[in-house]
Amino acid sequence: MHRKLAAGNWKMNGTGASLAEVEALAADHADAGCEVLICPPATLLSRMADMAGPGIAIGGQDCHAAAGGAHTGDISAAMLADAGAHYVILGHSERRADHGETDADVHAKAQAAWAAGLTTVICVGETLDDREGGRTLDVVHTQIAGSVPNGASPERVVIAYEPVWAIGTGKVPTLDQIGEVHGAIRAQLDDTFGTAAGTGIRILYGGSVKPGNAAEIFGVADVDGALVGGASLKAADFGPIIAALGASDG
Ligand code: PGA
């Protein structure tokens, strides 16, 4: 069984000065009791990989589906790996909204990422409209069916359940709501990829995870960690979240 995963998504935040936060985390959480991942902007990847040390894995926030070629401004999975990444976030709702990424796009990117040896953190989640319309489980099921390629395994895939309405808003689903969706995702992974794969694939919760709510979220069944945006930018916030996950990891 893989260790639980505390993943930070820095989004379009951070310059060289921010590396001090990672230095502080590496010093304070060398033996965190869980796996720690930070996904900085691409400009910081190799510098962060050089200084993070063995206790912190580094990941990209997106990759192109092609191995290379005429795609100005894009980054291939092999380039991420070459810069020191072991993970890549794919299909984040901000990319689905800002760049029109479809499930098929995410599926193709995931195959490219696996070919480069990266573990993919594939994001799914409903909008507020979906939630209020009672469509949450259907939407998430469809996104996973369309986004996660055949051959998914615990080495290749982490799922992040991130309700769009909870991201950056300070709003969080109830623990029952989180448990319901995570349980449904687990059942779908078991059905689709077999119990050995489905049970081992980590399912993260994301959306306004903070030091003050992390422990209770980590107590929910089938929550194997978190994907953290705003609260991952400062060691003083991300550190307690990492500690809460480590403490929950039996
Ligand atoms: P947030 O972002 O923690 O700032 O809500 C989470 C995410 O988008 O991954």
Image (tube, grey):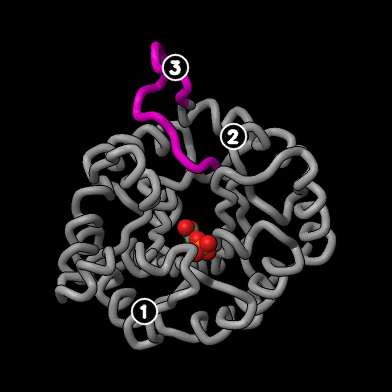
Percent coordinates x, y for residue 86 in the rendering = 56, 43
* Numbered badge on residue 178: 1
Q: Is residue 242 left or right of residue 104?
A: right
User: 155 or 63: which is nearer to us?
Assistant: 63
Percent coordinates x, y for residue 144 in the rendering = 25, 56
User: 27 or 43: which is nearer to us?
Assistant: 43
Q: Secondary structure at mark 3?
A: loop
Mark 3 and 1 residues: CB-CB less than 8 Å, in contact?
A: no
Q: Is mark 1 within 8 Å of ligand 1?
A: no
Q: Residue at x 78, y 63 (%)?
A: 30
Amino acid type of disc 3? Answer: Thr
Relative to residue 224, is residue 19 depicted above or below? above
Q: Secondary structure at mark 1?
A: helix
* Numbered badge on residue 42: 2
Q: Residue at x 67, y 66 (%)?
A: 238
Q: Is residue 173 left or right of residue 54?
A: left
Percent coordinates x, y for residue 142 in the rendering = 17, 58
Q: The magenta stretch spans which residues?
A: 60-74
Work out whether mark 1 precedes mark 2 in sequence or the reverse, and give the earlier one.
2
Amino acid type of disc 1? Answer: Ile
Q: Residue at x 29, y 47 (%)?
A: 151
Amino acid type of disc 2? Answer: Ala
Relative to residue 109, is residue 92 depicted above or below? below
Confirm whether the magenta stretch covers residue 172.
no
* Numbered badge on residue 72: 3
Work out whether mark 3 precedes mark 1 in sequence or the reverse, and give the earlier one.
3
Work out whether mark 3 precedes mark 2 in sequence or the reverse, and give the earlier one.
2
Q: Residue furthest top?
A: 70
Mark 3 and 2 residues: CB-CB less than 8 Å, in contact?
A: no
Q: Residue at x 48, y 26 (%)?
A: 75
Q: Is residue 60 visible?
A: yes
